[in-house]
């Protein structure tokens, strides 16, 4: 079995951190876990967009990237989470 790539590990770490934060905040209902699943879909979309942008600047892709990151922030906000401060790791409460 092949070892996971750095990107795969970062993705899994992000998902684990989100689910752990939900548990710590007492959000155990399936609906909240579904929101994490949706967030991870956007995570994949963002990675694809970033890969496309490495090939050259494209205004339409930049617009799409802004929309995807906005939706990701909306999900985090809805869950009562925000990215940790520099060097913190994981997520913090709002």
Image (cartoon, rainbow, N blue to C red):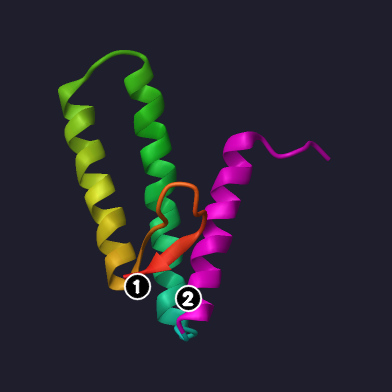
Q: Measured from the top left, where is residue 29 in percent x and y?
A: 46, 85
The mark nearer the N terminus, 1 or 2, is 2
Question: Going 24% across and 16% down the picture, which residue do you hit?
Answer: 57
Q: Check contact, mark 1 vs mark 2: CB within 8 A.
A: yes
Whether 69 is among the magenta residues is no
Q: Quadrant of the C terminus?
A: bottom left
Name the disc covering residue 22, or none: 2
* Label 2 neighbour load within 10 Å: few <14, some 14-19, many 20+: many
Question: Going 47% across and 81% down the picture, which residue do you hit?
Answer: 30
Residue 31 shown left or right of residue 15 in the figure: left
Bounds of the magenta segment: 1-25
The residue tagged 1 is 79
Magenta span: chief secondary structure = helix
Q: Measured from the top left, where is residue 23 in percent x and y?
A: 53, 79
Q: Measured from the top left, where is residue 33 in percent x and y?
A: 47, 73
Name the disc covering residue 43, or none: none
Dot 1: element: loop
Residue 38 shown left or right of residue 58 in the figure: right
Q: Is residue 26 above or below residue 15?
A: below
Question: Going 16% across and 24% down the picture, which residue do you hit?
Answer: 59
Whether 4 is among the magenta residues is yes
* Label 1 neighbour load within 10 Å: few <14, some 14-19, many 20+: many
Q: Is residue 21 above or below residue 57?
A: below
Q: CA distance from mark 1 to mark 2?
A: 8 Å
The image quarter containing residue 7 is top right
Residue lying farthest top? 56
Q: Quadrant of the N terminus?
A: top right
């Amino acid at each position: 079995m092949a070892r996971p790539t750095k990107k795969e590990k970062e993705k899994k770490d992000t998902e684990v951190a989100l689910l752990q934060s939900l548990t710590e905040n007492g959000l155990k209902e399936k609906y909240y876990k579904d929101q994490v699943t949706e967030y991870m879909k956007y995570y994949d979309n963002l990675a694809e967009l970033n890969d496309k942008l490495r090939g050259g600047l494209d205004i339409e892709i930049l617009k799409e990237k802004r929309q995807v990151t906005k939706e990701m922030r909306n999900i985090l906000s809805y869950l009562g989470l925000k990215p940790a401060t520099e060097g913190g790791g994981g997520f913090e409460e709002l």
